[in-house]
């Protein structure tokens, strides 16, 4: 039988906020802070008929915080690559890109990549 103390408990999985946030510099040199989406947020956005990108920006921009309307205004004025860079960072922090999951969670737990 496996030693259960080596595994996460229900409390470990449900009481800790494991969503990572980081400062990020856009291609236009502006510093922002973004966070990843939770699984619930991601599924909710995927199943609703909404502007996924604007709602993702609104949910995940920590500093400055933005409404969906403000996110759409930014999308209208920004170079395409700026928004793509931000949404790629959000995907990475959400552990939605191929290599991000382990790296994001190791950074929370203070583990090295080795």
Image: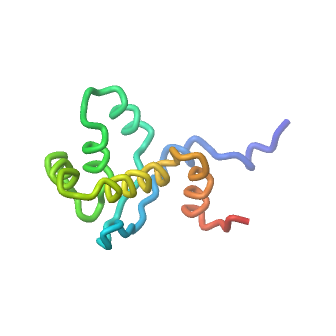
Which of the 4 image quarters holds residue 34? Answer: bottom left
Relative to 73, residue 46 above or below:
above
Q: Nearer the viewer, residue 61 or 20?
A: 61
Residue at the right extreme of this rendering: 1
Residue at x 37% of width, y 31% of height? 46
Q: Nearer the viewer, residue 2 or 70?
A: 70
Q: Nearer the viewer, residue 10 or 17?
A: 17
Relative to 29, residue 50 above or below:
above
x, y (%) of residue 13?
A: 55, 45
Residue at x 73% of width, y 48% of height? 5
* 2 on left or right of 78: right
x, y (%) of residue 53?
A: 30, 43
* 103 on left or right of 45: right
Q: Quadrant of the N terminus?
A: top right
x, y (%) of residue 77?
A: 18, 56
* 111 on left or right of 44: right
Q: How is the image coloured?
A: rainbow
Q: Quadrant of the C terminus?
A: bottom right
Residue at x 40% of width, y 46% of height? 37
Residue at x 52% of width, y 48% of height? 95
Which of the 4 image quarters holds residue 66? Answer: bottom left
x, y (%) of residue 23?
A: 39, 68
């Amino acid at each position: 039988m496996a030693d259960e103390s080596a595994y996460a408990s229900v409390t470990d999985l449900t009481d800790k906020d494991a969503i990572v946030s980081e400062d990020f510099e856009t291609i236009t040199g502006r510093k922002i802070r973004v966070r990843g989406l939770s699984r619930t947020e991601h599924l909710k956005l995927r199943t609703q008929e909404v502007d996924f990108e604007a709602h993702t920006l609104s949910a995940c921009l920590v500093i400055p915080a933005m409404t969906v309307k403000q996110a759409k205004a930014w999308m209208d004025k920004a170079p395409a690559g700026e928004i793509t860079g931000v949404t790629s960072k959000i995907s990475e922090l959400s552990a939605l890109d191929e290599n991000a999951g382990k790296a994001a969670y190791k950074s929370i737990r203070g583990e090295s990549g080795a």
